Image (cartoon, grey):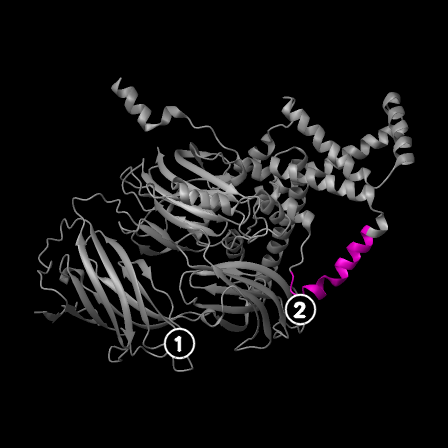
Amino acid sequence: MLDSYKLKSVCTLPFVCHKKINTVGNSNADVPLADPGMYQLDITLRRGLSLAARDRGGTSDPYVKFKIGRKEVFRSKIIHKNLNPVWEEKACILVDHLREPLYIKVFDYDFGLQDDFMGSAFLDLTQLELNRSTDVTLTLKDPHYPDHDLGIILLSVILTPKEGEPRDVTMLRRKSWKRSSKFQTQSLRLSDQHRKSHLWRGIVSITLIEGRDLKAMDSNGLSDPYVKFRLGHQKYKSKIMPKTLNPQWREQFDFHLYEEKGGVIDITAWDRDAGKRDDFIGRCQVDLSSLSREQTHKLELQLEEGEGHLVLLVTLTASATVSISDLSVHSLEDQKERGEILKRYSPLRIFNNIKDVGFLQVKVIRAEGLMAADVTGKSDPFCVVELNNDRLLTHTVYKNLNPEWNKVFTFNIKDIHSVLEVTVYDEDRDRSADFLGRVAIPLLSIQNGEQKAYVLKNKQLTGPTKGVIYLEIDVIFNAVKASLRTLIPKEQKYIEEENRLSKQLLLRNFVRTKRCVMVLVNAAYYVNGCFDWDSPPRSLAAFVLFLFVVWNFELYMIPLLLLSLLTWNYFLIISGKDNRQRDTVVEDMLEDEEEEDDKDDKVAEQQNASPGQAFTVQCLDSSKMKDGEKKGFINKIYAIQEVCVSVQNILDDVASFGERIKNTFNWTVPFLSWLAIVALCVFTVILYFIPLRYIVLVWGINKFTKKLRSPYAIDNNELLDFLSRVPSDVQVVQYQELKPDHSHSPYKRKKNTLG
């Protein structure tokens, strides 16, 4: 017979919880708390009943947080406009001891605003039966208003002791990443029967076209609008359009679909205000469950709580090839599956899904000699594998400096010029994870099927840190699709560190820009020297060449000259006369910048403020300044800081543009240089056989009719899109592969010790 009883409540807390037991068993209340070992807590969040209404429409958008101590260990999905939500979500949590109860907090989600508290309860883990499924009913209460009835939450829990088993339980932790690099975790255990899991069900492609008649938020009757999108824990922020009420964004980005029904995209529009809080313009939502798949929908959305409309294009497509599995179960080992992948990316299937460029398989095998991040002289390492906006994680191996993960990740390649980033972190239960090392590997530099030891680098990827990681990577792609994708805008990363003012970074960008400008200045001096006959033989040769070229000049000679320069550099490289030099100047500047960043991080941690804010705080004496003067001074400081950051970014753009042109002709990325040769050959043939007037006519007709043929097409420049794929000198340094020092291998040390 099934027993049921109430859990004992802690008298100092006004929370109440009830528990129903499905099966008879012994409570673990008498388990000694001095040495409890490791426990695994499997929770199924069932549903909520009669929850509190927090929105004006008499409903709420509830979600649930689980906390143990001060650590958030789980966050549920949001159920929109429902006071009786059904979640049916599972979480697997590792518990060090049972002294800390599990806290359950329910919130009403308000995008752009602070979420409303809907009640909380706790579950005393010492009252759970071991190895038994238990139904739990929790009554939600507000500590400030204990008499209010806020509804109930239904759970099912199983508590399993883990003593005597290895602590590196096979788990996959899916974590929502914030800009602060702090993790809010959801856990999903990989079952033994299904050791390969696909992590999302589809892709929603969004194009933000424009805004119409937005609300004026500034004193000049205009606004500086930008838009924020959120789907679950995924976020995207558009660029800022200055001084307009009818902005034209033309931005495209993708979100992952984790739910079968699709979910709801929350959209808010904001007005950018330097030095103070941005103004709220309005909000709207897109219910993806109401949209049909494999079809593009044009949506004109009215902004609520504000004025104006937003125009979007939304397309839902099937899932990409993204999965995680154990080392014994992966795609390329299965000959049938490998054949299907090779067929999918064969040269004959050029126009079949142009966005699907290729397939990437990453085997994360092990790491050696990692940095000790804990006081015990050990670390709890886990690995994050990133390709553009796709992020997958391994399980954590506890108390180990030489962890073995043996996991296989597969990705869908949308751009062959993407860079695979593999980062190792140390898991900390009470705070954000500690950085241990990172490697960045361009997909075009990968040698298929070769297991390699990559030396881990620092955060800036400028120098080595402690440890190596062993990876085996395979890339299969369609070269024609990859070439065509090179001529469209590059995918923007959603989670990037915001640019901040840095003295070393500003100096580095200035020196890089100066070097590019000096190339042009030296060329001008050289030409002027020919005119001045500083060297008679050189000037005579230049004069004869000038007469010959001008007399015989045709337009096709311009791409032919660039083609000749590329070909000349190619033969120099293959003949062993490579004149490319390692850029030690950029390396030195990057090392100096890394030292300054470390200092800034320490100062920021101590002051809990950015360098600009700390400077502002130090300069202000509130006792000597009036409020108006103080606000005006703060605004001036922010304005100066924004101008300096803008100058810093402009110098970086100019320097990167020059360096990318140089690196194209230097064959830094052979694929791109070959693509440039093909394009120049085509241009040379076209200019040779087709009169210029016809070429200009076709170009003009295309430009004039482009908006008529495709009103919502995203404007782009093919040449700039091509150059954006060529690495700058800074990126070349960051992507350089460091040679491992085998003398530091722990396996080698053991051999030497035995010998």
Q: At numbered mark 2, what does the secondary structure look like: helix, strand or loop? A: loop
Q: Is residue 15 visible?
A: no
Residue flagged by tag 1: what amino acid is it?
Answer: Lys
Residue 538 % position (x, y): 85, 23
The alpha-carbon separation of the residues under discs 2 and 1 comes to 34 Å
| In the depicted structure, whether residue 205 falls above or below residue 646 | below
* Quadrant assignment for the N terminus: bottom left
Q: Residue at x 49, y 69 (%)?
A: 292
Q: What is the number of the mark on residue 559?
A: none
Question: Which of marks 1 and 2 precedes in the sequence?
Answer: 1
| In the depicted structure, whether residue 423 falls above or below residue 453 | below
| In the depicted structure, whether residue 269 falls above or below residue 424 | below
Task: Please name the predominant secondary structure of the magenta segment in the image.
Answer: helix
**Most foreground residue, 294 or 595:** 294
Asked if disc 2 and disc 1 are in contact, CB closer than 8 Å, the reply is: no
Closer mark to the observer between disc 2 and disc 1:
1
Q: Residue at x 67, y 43 (%)?
A: 657
Residue flagged by tag 2: what amino acid is it?
Answer: Thr
Residue 454 % position (x, y): 43, 33
Q: Residue at x 8, y 57 (%)?
A: 30
Q: Is residue 277 left or right of residue 658?
A: left
Q: Residue at x 32, y 64 (%)?
A: 65
Q: At numbered mark 1, what does the secondary structure look like: helix, strand or loop? A: loop
Q: What is the number of the mark on residue 244?
A: 2
Instruction: Give the image quarter of residue 508.
Output: top right
Magenta span contains residue 673: no
Region rendered in magenta? 695-713
Q: Is residue 464 visible?
A: yes
Residue 685 % position (x, y): 78, 41
Determine which residue is flagged by label 1.
Answer: 81
Q: Is residue 427 left or right of residue 251?
A: left
**Most foreground residue, 97 or 396:** 396
